[in-house]
Amino acid sequence: MATICALGLMSGTSMDGIDLALLRTDGVDIVEQGPGSFVPYEAAFRARIVAGLEEAKQIGQRLERPGSLAVLEEDITRRHADAVAAFLAGAAGSWGKPELIGFHGQTVLHRPQQALTVQLGDGQMLADLTGLPVVFDMRAEDMRHGGQGAPLVPAYHAALARSLPPGLARFPVVLVNIGGISNISFVPEHGDPIAFDTGPGNGLIDQWVAREAGVSFDADGAIAGKGTTVREVVSRYLAKPFFAQGGPKSLDRSDFTLAEAEGLNVTDGARTLAAVSAAAILKSAEYLPEKPKLWIICGGGRKNPHIMSDLKAGAKAEGADVISAEQAGFDGDATEAEAWAYLAVRSLNGLPLTFPNTTGCEKPVSGGVVVKPLP
Ligand SMILES: Nc1ncnc2c1ncn2[C@@H]1O[C@H](COP(=O)(O)OP(=O)(O)OP(=O)(O)O)[C@@H](O)[C@H]1O
Ligand SMILES: CC(=O)N[C@H]1[C@@H]2OC[C@@H](O2)[C@@H](O)[C@@H]1O[C@H](C)C(=O)O
């Protein structure tokens, strides 16, 4: 299959902005990772998305856009187009001109039990504004085949694991994405990955520090650094039914709340929620066929030193190592955007995006809608 240059766009559950990354791939091998970038949403726009999450709860059919959601979708799409233009006008443009965009959009509702997942993002509008073909809506087909519709990044995680230099690769490798929600991909030396969402990532920490300290995230874990983990609260979170079984499973941003942390002071709350994030990830090992030997941490949560130190301590007790994406030679901020570039090329080539062991779909499923700019 032909190698092409693709541009991936991800606006994740943290709702902090748009990640962009270029990738050269044939949809199987990662031929070359290109530059990445991030365009933050300002606080007022993030607040509009948060308000949109509430309105999205009324959605019964995935194409419905009640209340302000139609306008929000247009604005999200326009911001992606502006981000692409700025990105390609800079150094990224000289690395390569993308032939295809992989567009995630903004998840506002995810109800796998109802086979309902809604990402705001108008693929045709983005194609028209950028002049490039766009692959979007990559989760729906998986759900039509009985899958959770998430996580989708495991196909790319597996390619990353297989690209590790022999000196670093200690299989089974687990790639972890700590975004608003966390998810893992278990990659054995031979065979297909096993994947599922593992629990809250940074989402609860963000909500906690926004409410208690008026900041959008706990930068470098500074607030948590002044607090202590309250074990009883961690146990209360881990006692939730979500943790009583393995995958396939996926989460909506609202599935976990701050309820269990109420009453803590601001610093203990931030530290405890970081501990919850790490403990939830480590607990996933109970549902894997073999003990992981190497954990590689991607996503914004790797910048919280408390999540990282808890992960390292827990993994060490099981004889495993924890390293950041960068220590593995990857760009941990760009992984998801790269994944959407990779998945777009797979979609174009009719290759599966998801597998029975990653989302629970009944057979490997491709997906995504491909649109071209109108003449
Ligand atoms: N320097 C930092 N210190 C601590 N936390 C950080 C730092 N930088 C980013 N984060 C956390 O990472 C989050 C963003 O992570 P990321 O971009 O991986 O999430 P996402 O892509 O929105 O989520 P998802 O994977 O759930 O779709 C921020 O909301 C913040 O909580
Ligand atoms: C429905 C949805 O957008 N889910 C996200 C979310 O954020 C992390 C986790 O929950 C994961 O399942 C997924 O994103 C990643 C990138 C994925 O699909 O692989």
Image: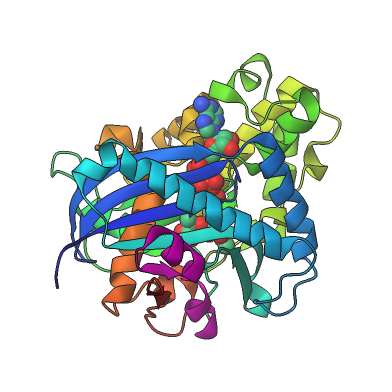
Tell me the quarter of the image containing the N terminus: bottom left
Q: Is residue 117 left or right of residue 138?
A: right
Farthest front residue in view:
375
In magenta stretch: residue 124: yes
Q: Is residue 38 left or right of residue 330?
A: right
- The image position of residue 210, as x and y in percent, is 74, 31
Q: Is residue 116 left or right of residue 297?
A: right
Residue 28 vs residue 72, the one in the foreground: 72
On the question of residue 56 being in view, the answer is yes
Q: Which residues are magenta?
A: 123-146
On the question of residue 196 being in view, the answer is no
Farthest top residue in view:
226
200 versus 252 height, above or below: above
270 versus 254 height, above or below: above
Residue 174 vs residue 7, the one in the foreground: 7
Residue 335 vs residue 51, the one in the foreground: 51
Q: Is residue 67 left or right of residue 346?
A: right
Farthest right residue in view:
263
- The image position of residue 175, as x and y in percent, is 37, 49
- The image position of residue 343, as x and y in percent, is 35, 65
- The image position of residue 242, as x and y in percent, is 66, 60
In magenta stretch: residue 249: no
For the point 61% across and 60% down, the residue is 74
For the point 57% across and 23% down, the residue is 219
**Quarter holding residue 312:** top left
**What sort of colour scheme is used for the picture?**
rainbow
